[in-house]
DNA sequence: GGAACCAGCCTAGCTCTCCTAGGCAACCGG
DNA sequence: CCGGTTGCCTAGGAGAGCTAGGCTGGTTCC
């Protein structure tokens, strides 16, 4: 009696709902219980679709890294040099602005041994970052150094901005961002030797 | 009977123990219960010294930010220009390497309204970062842009390194780090106009 | 069309963390 | 040595994570 129809849960639907929840309420509020509540279902029911809470977060991280890599790929298509740099960087920062919870999830510590899908997504994202450099024609190992610098600079800036590090000062975060991109372009065009 | 002597807890001792725990076991394992266990005391006993679990983390963040600012100040003493940049950056990265849990705590989202002490420590740390730039003689608002870039680059690089982002590639993280410092120095010496 | 099977969601119940209320004992000042 | 304060206690409730096992709706196959 009362027998409601089934909720029709799948790992994919749960992951997507977790992503929405993360963006709305913050990554720390993405719990198995909260997700079950959102589907009007008991929390124990989710464990036929998810191994555990960690599994949920890894799936979420994988989703975010994949979306990020997709956006990066779209931004880079048909661009090179400074255009590519700026397009990639803006796509990265916009994603973090529009999807703070997903972005936070993408920063999760992943175990490449067991969490293969997530590691693949991370690798794809790293390859996109490397693609920025095609127009700058750097040899190895300089290219690797430059990739690390770029990724670090993007992530660091966005991360500080997200956690409110820039709110004391009146200088708009957008302005500092585009100055940083100018600086990074300049340094890539004139990469210091040795 | 059995009456053990008192443990002699204070907020300071608890915060220090939390810092050690964070470095040994990771920030996510810094819980009120774990801390009580470490002192051989019931978890409820800690609530006469700490408001709540959040309070503990904020105190930990404050400790970390203060230590970081102290190290930065020591590194900068008597140095200018490139020397100052490198000394600061290395102090920053070494701290994160030696104290990963404390470093992670320093990245906590702080509410400057209520968490005044923590906000002060964060401000002191930001002032140290700004002090790097004295030797480069940048006008405002370029100085603010440069501070944000530097802080972002340091934090981003260290953060990616900590979460294992560089372990696929054979290139040593140290080497890429010092190339990044070279690049940052170059860009500060020749800051792009407009 | 019935039987058997499964997949999907359930209840029950455990552990752990966080936190509050109230008790008793140790230490400290007078 | 007596009263007050402080410090740690027990008891207990809420919420999150997770496991074991049960019931049922939908599919499959004779």
Image: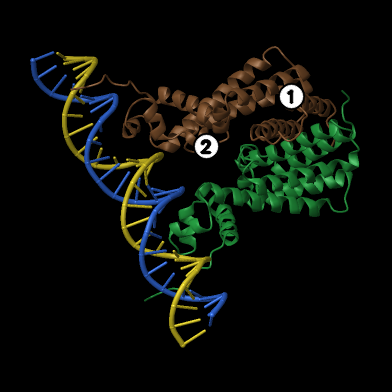
Chain colours: A green, B brown, C yellow, D blue
Q: As displayed, is residue A109 above or below residue B151?
A: below
Indicate the secondary structure of the residue bearing disc 2: loop
Within-10-Å neighbours for mark 1: few <14, some 14–19, many 20+: few
Q: How many badges with numbers are in the image?
A: 2
Question: Looking at the image, can residue B189 be seen?
Answer: yes
Q: As displayed, is residue A16 above or below residue A103?
A: below
The chain under label 2 reads B
Please give the residue where the numbered disc 1 appears in the rendered image.
B174
Q: Rounded to the nearest whole Å, what is the CA distance between mark 2 and mark 1?
A: 35 Å
Please give the residue where the numbered disc 2 appears in the rendered image.
B112
Q: State the residue at coordinates (89%, 35%).
A: A138
The chain under label 1 reads B
Q: Are marks 2 and 1 on the same chain?
A: yes
Q: Earlier in the sequence, mark 2 or mark 1?
A: 2
Foreground residue among B86 and B140: B86
Quarter the N terminus of chain B occupies = top left
Q: State the residue at coordinates (59%, 26%).
A: B124
Within-10-Å neighbours for mark 2: few <14, some 14–19, many 20+: some
Residue A29 coordinates in the image, percent (x, y):
50, 50
Residue A57 coordinates in the image, percent (x, y):
57, 48
Q: State the residue at coordinates (66%, 39%).
A: A170
Indicate the secondary structure of the residue bearing disc 1: helix
Q: Determine the image quadrant of residue B102.
A: top right
Mark closer to the observer (2, 1): 1
Question: Looking at the image, can residue A101 be seen?
Answer: no
Residue D20 coordinates in the image, percent (x, y):
39, 53
Quarter the C terminus of chain B occupies = top right
Q: Is residue B103 left or right of residue B190?
A: left
């Amino acid at each position: 009696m009362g027998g409601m129809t089934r909720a029709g849960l799948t790992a994919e639907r749960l992951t997507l709902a977790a992503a929405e929840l993360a963006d709305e309420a913050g990554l720390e509020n993405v719990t198995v219980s909260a997700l079950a509540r959102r589907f009007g279902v008991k929390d124990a029911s989710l464990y036929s679709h998810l191994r555990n809470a960690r599994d949920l977060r890894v799936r979420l991280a994988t989703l975010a890294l994949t979306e990020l890599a997709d956006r990066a790929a779209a931004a880079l298509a048909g661009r090179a040099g400074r255009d590519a740099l700026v397009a990639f960087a803006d796509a990265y920062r916009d994603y973090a602005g529009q999807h703070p919870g997903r972005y936070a999830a993408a920063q999760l510590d992943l175990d490449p041994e067991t969490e293969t899908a997530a590691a693949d997504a991370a690798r794809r994202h790293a390859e996109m970052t490397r693609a920025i450099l095609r127009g700058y024609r750097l040899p190895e190992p300089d290219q690797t150094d430059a990739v690390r610098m770029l990724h670090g600079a993007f992530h660091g800036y966005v991360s500080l901005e997200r956690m409110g590090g820039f709110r004391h000062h009146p200088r708009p975060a957008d302005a500092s961002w585009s100055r940083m991109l100018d600086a990074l372009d300049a340094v890539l065009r004139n990469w210091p030797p040795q």
